[in-house]
Image: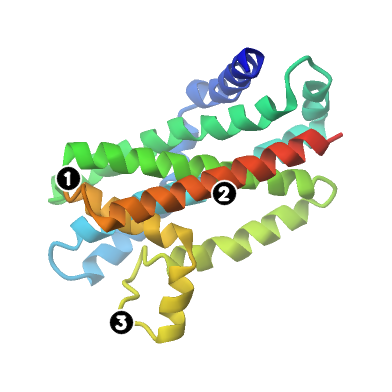
Amino acid sequence: MTTLITDTRTVFSRELRPVLRDPFTIIFSMVQPLVFLALFTPLLPDDSLQWFVPGIIVMSCLFASSMTGSNLLFEIQTGSHERMLVTPLRRPALLIGRALKEIVPMFAQAALIVAVCVPFGFRFNLVGAVLGLIILATFCIGLGALSYTLALASKNQEWLFWTVQQTLIFPLLLLAGVLLPIENGPGWLRALAKGNPLSYVVDAERTLFNGEIWTSATLSGLIAAAATATLGLWAGVRAMRRSD
C-alpha cells in the first residue's frame, strides 16, 4: 500500500506539471461553458444565476474530465505510455494518479466561473460551495478514470474515443437539467434523467451553493458521485493492468 501511494503521488505530479506550466489550457477549456453562460442567461428569468451558475460549473468539469483520455491516447501514439509501463511504477497508480489530477483543474475552473459571475449578482454560500466542489471532485475522478479507460480500449482506433465521447456528453448534459429544467418535461424524459448520475450531482451543487446543506439532494449527489468514482476507478485500474 505504501508503494502504491508513493507511485500514485509520482504519477499525479507528472500529470499535474504540464497544467501548472501552461495554465492557459484551463482557461481555454472554459470558453465553451462561458459562451453558454453568456447566451443562455439573458433568456432565463430574473435571479436565474443562482440556478444556472452551479450547472455551468458542472458542465465545465464534464467537458474537461471527459476529454482527458485524449492525453493518454497521445502518449500511446508517441510511445510515452509504453515506456511508463516498463517502469517499476505499479499499473494501478498509472490510472489513479491521472484520475486524481482532475481535481486541480476542476477547482481552478470553478473558481474562475464564480469570479466572473459574482459581479453580475451571483451569490453563494462558502461552506456549501466547498462541500459541493468536493462532491464534484469525486465525480470528476470517476469520469476522468472512465475517459482513460475508453482511451485504452480505443488505442488502435482513435476515432472510436471521440465518437463515444461526443455521442454521450450532450445527452448526459441535457438530461441532467444543466441548461434547462426538465421537471416539466414528458414522463419519458424525466425517467431518463433519474437514471443519469450527473442529474443528482447537478441538483446537489445547486442546493449546496445556495446554502442548503443538510438535504436529500446533497446525499443523493454524494452517492451518485461516489458510485461514479468507484465504477470509474475499478474499470480504469482493470484496463490499465491489462494494457500492454
Q: Please rate how many residues cluster around mark 3, counting C-alpha atoms within 10 Å: few if below 14, some from 14 to 19, many from 20.
A: few
Q: Which residue is mark 2?
A: 66
Write the residue at 22% across / 48% down. Answer: 209
Amino acid type, label 1: Phe
In three-dimensional space, the C-alpha distance between marks 1 and 2, rounded to whole angstroms, equals 27 Å
Q: Please rate how many residues cluster around mark 2, counting C-alpha atoms within 10 Å: few if below 14, some from 14 to 19, many from 20.
A: many
Q: Check whether the beta carbons of the residues at disc 1 and disc 2 lie within 8 A of each other.
A: no
**Drawn side of residue 237 relative to residue 143, left or right:** right
- Secondary element under disc 3, as helix, strand or loop, is loop
Write the residue at 51% across / 20% down. Answer: 21
Tell me the tag on residue 124.
1
Amino acid type, label 3: Asn
**Drawn side of residue 216 relative to residue 68, left or right:** left
Viewer-side residue, 131 vs 165: 131
Amino acid type, label 2: Ser
Q: Which residue is mark 3?
A: 184
List x then y, in percent, for residue 73.
73, 40
Write the residue at 59% across / 63% down. Answer: 168
